[in-house]
Amino acid sequence: MNEFDVIKTFFKESRFFTNPHKIFKCKSFVGIGDDASVFSPPKGFDLVVSSDLLIEGTHFRSDHTPESIGHKVLAVNLSDIAAMGAEPLCFTLSVNMPKFDSNWLYGFCDGIFNIANETSCKLIGGDTVKSKENAPMFFGITVIGIVPSGKALKRKSMKLNDDIWISGALGDPGEAIKNNFFCEKLLTPQPRLALGKKLLEIANSAIDVSDGLSSDLSHLLEESSKNLKKKIFASIDFLSVASCLGPCLFTNYLKNKLSLDECCSLAVSSGDEYELCFSARKGLRKTIKSLSLELNLPLTRIGEVICERESEKIPGFNIKKNIIWKNTKGLPLKPENYPPDGFKHF
Amino acid sequence: MNEFDVIKTFFKESRFFTNPHKIFKCKSFVGIGDDASVFSPPKGFDLVVSSDLLIEGTHFRSDHTPESIGHKVLAVNLSDIAAMGAEPLCFTLSVNMPKFDSNWLYGFCDGIFNIANETSCKLIGGDTVKSKENAPMFFGITVIGIVPSGKALKRKSMKLNDDIWISGALGDPGEAIKNNFFCEKLLTPQPRLALGKKLLEIANSAIDVSDGLSSDLSHLLEESSKNLKKKIFASIDFLSVASCLGPCLFTNYLKNKLSLDECCSLAVSSGDEYELCFSARKGLRKTIKSLSLELNLPLTRIGEVICERESEKIPGFNIKKNIIWKNTKGLPLKPENYPPDGFKHF
């Protein structure tokens, strides 16, 4: 089967898109099958672009179902689009398959085109490669989204005294990886697109939790500190984090396998969550609670942004770190007892 | 070194871009370091998007210099942008490095940022991954370009009686891969961006030669046949192809190692050329010759687009094929003697 047959057989997603994608009704649209794809971006919008690599053995396991791998490959990129408050438009997909397996590829396409269809994100191009057989399978994906001009949610625009919020539950994907158990959230994460879009009018800053809250929140604080030209800190309460523990982690607490503080520490270090962590001013608590009901998605206030003077009042706190963790009794952890950072890439 | 240090050390390309990139002077620009990058596309332009995967052992060898690998990774994508008549704007780069080698990475960045700078194509994001050590190194790249609205050069718009043209010389990269000799064009291909842009006003259709002219021209004909709703054919003259043989291949002819027909057959099967093959109406020959002088780039007319009735006059021609090759004596080759197709992906 040559590359063109593969594209025709597997990657023409017309069986999924029953209505023509509204964005591509423009005259100049060119999709799969030319040197590059062409489209007109809608007026009044900025473009939002995110790229990821997903490798067998690092980001997914070969014994995961092809449907879940297809889903995840696109979902993790859509999560970045969600964190900018943007709406997905289209994506390119590059695939390396050391061994060609058409059954596997059918399953993969079911997974990726189902979520593409649900989120109105159209495949516009990509690349297919067959490497040597001993190489891992991997996928390169680029998603292009749109956001009203100048409105994108950035990491760098946290404000002093902002509340810090997290969507959904934390911890189960991390536990599932460590202890090798089935976890739907790990296999088929749901990008928080509806939330991201609503946050455009509410949040000051946002990031998606892919490496672990401890790492990702740290990035928010670093970027915002640079932008504000003064160092800011987050104070995070484990008592609030405890109310958004994933069910598996919470079961471990109920069975007395772990203390509540240990559970919280694991939850804030767990990667592969694809929840949104965002900051918003204190006056918006009611609005955010209503939003949580509207979206049927837990939104939990877990702490706040404080200044250096406030952080100095915390006994034993080392200002080289930018997060102050308070245990479920409200007492600050010492930096040496901090939750580990999340996933390290190098 | 964590991912952020890698990005800061290697992928902040300010040492290359001395002037701020004009396109990104917009208020809403967000570059590397957020969940996704954000920019405003200029008004009156369509976006052109192309993605490629390049894998060690398949697309480049580990003993190639890191500078040439960096150059080629971006160049092959820019070639797709050139084939649409577009101007590059920005790119994302995803990197898998099984072993972290900072010297190698410095060289790679020199290569990629040099060509990025020359072509005003700005890095806006990507991903860095460290897979298991036995995996190959690979790169995923997506280039976004712009073209005046509705003007992109497509594969499908070849017209009956068009002349068929090729830029530059053909054959040396294919020979270099087969016989393992040094070939600058193979290592550091030059995307034909200036030509592509000029062809917007001249050509009816275009494709870049990455898999081999025999394959790539066939795609032009297929797509255009579908679009015209009648089958069209190309008649290609080896006597014209002979005048654009690469110097190594031509030397083999001069040394009597190969006949001229054999050289032409190899030239039209050689991949990794990154020349543009385009079609234009016969009335534009003078214009194209002047363009060749202006760009200091050979542009050779190698054949024409013919209809089914014309193709039936060719003795022994099998209309399942869509290219009629004529040897240097002007006699049609039999389909069984045709140049092999170029690179097969699966």
Image (cartoon, coloured by chain):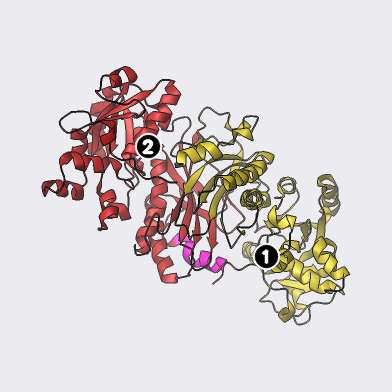
Chain colours: A red, B yellow
Q: Residue at x 75, y 48 (%)?
A: B195
Amino acid type for the residue under numbered disc 2:
Ile
Crowding near the residue tagged with mark 2, few <14, some 14–19, many ≥20 C-alpha atoms within 10 Å: many
What is the magenta segment's predominant secondary structure?
helix
> What secondary structure is found at the residue carrying circle 1?
helix
Quarter where residue B250 is shown: bottom right
* The stretch drawn in magenta includes residue B306: no
Residue B12's disc is none
Residue B275 visible? The answer is no
Within the magenta stretch, is there residue A7?
yes
Q: Nearer the viewer, residue A11 or A340?
A: A340
Q: Identify residue for label 1.
A: B221
Residue B66 image offset from top left, x and y in percent: 62, 50
Pointers 2 and 1 in contact (C-beta within 8 Å): no
The percent coordinates of residue B222 (x first, y second) are 64, 66
Question: Could you say whether the residue bearing mark 2 is in a helix, strand or loop?
Answer: strand
Residue B325 visible, this angle: yes
Q: Residue furthest top?
A: A309
Farthest residue, direction left: A255
Task: Tell me the distance, in whole angstroms, between the alpha carbons under discs 2 and 1.
Answer: 47 Å
The image shows residue B344 at horizontal and vertical percentages of 60, 68
Q: Nearer the viewer, residue B341 or A339?
A: A339
Q: Which mark is residue A207?
A: 2
At 41% from the left edge and 49% from the top edge, which residue is drawn?
A120
The stretch in magenta equals A1-14
Where on the picture, by quarter, is residue A193?
top left
